[in-house]
Image (cartoon, rainbow, N blue to C red):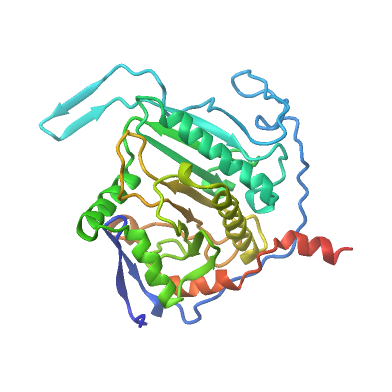
Amino acid sequence: MIPKESHRRFNPLTGEWILVSPHRTQRPWQGKVEQYFTHLTPEYINNCYLCPGNIRANGDINPNYTSTFVFDNDFSALKKDKSNFFINESGLIKAQTESGICRVVCFSPKHNLTLAELELGEIVKVVNTWQDEYSFLGSKPFINYVQIFENKGEIMGCSNSHPHGQIWAQENIPNEPFKEQFNQLQYYKEKNTSLLSDYINLEKQKQERIIFENDSFILLVPFWAVWPFESMIISKRKINNILQLVEKEIELFAEILKITTVKYDNIFNTSFPYSAGIHQSPTDGLEHPEWHLHMHFYPPLLRSATIKKFMVGYEMLGEPQRDITPERSAEILKEMYSVHYSLKIINENK
């Protein structure tokens, strides 16, 4: 039974807590559906540095690619070469150099499409590209973690609207997957089973936060969700990383990616912004039986296409807080059609 008064929820992946205040919302859903609009953006823009055949910022010319296209980021946050700089003064002033590789993955040659609008076969090619990059980058001796992610929308700091994601591969495991690794390992040592396998079994019993599932993946709003419409895709089969997906699982991963992003867009009839990324085992040569492949979606929108949830005040100084419950968010997402709203507009205009 979910309490109606203020309560805290525990995130077993990170070991952190979130404050939930459902009484602050008299009506749990106060969403505003924006007016329908049609896509006015063309398939090709001559000054876009990601479109086929165009010149990028560093002077390189993109090939006339017809599927996915991957290249080293022209403004890379990590570099392969490093000076081995290291300081540690009394454990209080510590710093060290970090080497790595940053890659850009264009999902499609068409400037005006997002993952939600790509055909299923095109998303399969995106997943295949992620696999190739995880294998290629992870095989390098100085790379110990490969972070695949996407920032979608201007509101999330995306500097180019051409459909693309990024991959940052680096020497050390970054903070968020490091916390998840620690807690998954502790759970595995204690129970000899996967934390997320046990979690999705609980969710299937309760049927309170599941949005969609197919034979290989489950989409849900986690019990400990921070963002209003935060969700997570978890593999039903306990696998460590994306390379362990078999052909049918790749297709079903593409399917659930499309359904997730379409449902987001349909909430407010807009191209829904988010930051999303895959968490999977490090590439440090160890087995990591504790790891269970999953993907996070962190969208900021709250009540309309223009109202954003901000992490401020108490949330920056205390802990994350939300009003609308994860259960209500899951209900709203579950109710959304799995057909993109733009197709409805086209059919209505015929």
Front residue of 64 and 140: 140
Q: In which quarter of the image is residue 285?
A: top left
Q: Does residue 348 appear to the left or right of 153 in the view shown?
A: right
The residue at 44%/70% (across/down) is 326
Please identify the quarter of the rendering in which residue 313 is found. Answer: bottom left
Q: Is residue 63 left or right of residue 174?
A: right
Residue 101, above or below 260 = above
Give left or right: position of 46 versus 242: right
Viewer-nearest residue: 248 or 37: 248
In this orientation, does residue 24 appear? no
- Residue 234 at x, y percent in the picture: 45, 57
Q: In which quarter of the image is the N terminus?
A: bottom left
Q: In which quarter of the image is the C terminus?
A: bottom right
Total of numbered circles in the picture? 0
Furthest residue in direction right, as rendered: 350
Residue at 67% in and 45% down: 122
Quarter location, residue 47: top right
Would you say 229 lies left or right of 314 here? right
At a point 57% along the width and 58% down the height, the residue shown is 256
Residue 9 seen from this side:
yes
Percent of width and height locating residue 226: 40, 62
Give the vertical position of 141 relative to 241 (above or below).
above
Q: Nearer the viewer, residue 154 or 222?
A: 222
Residue at image point 53% right, 28% down: 73
Q: Where is residue 177 in the image (x, y as percent from the top left)?
A: 34, 46
213 shown above or below 115: below
Give the image location of residue 251, x and y in percent. Answer: 60, 51
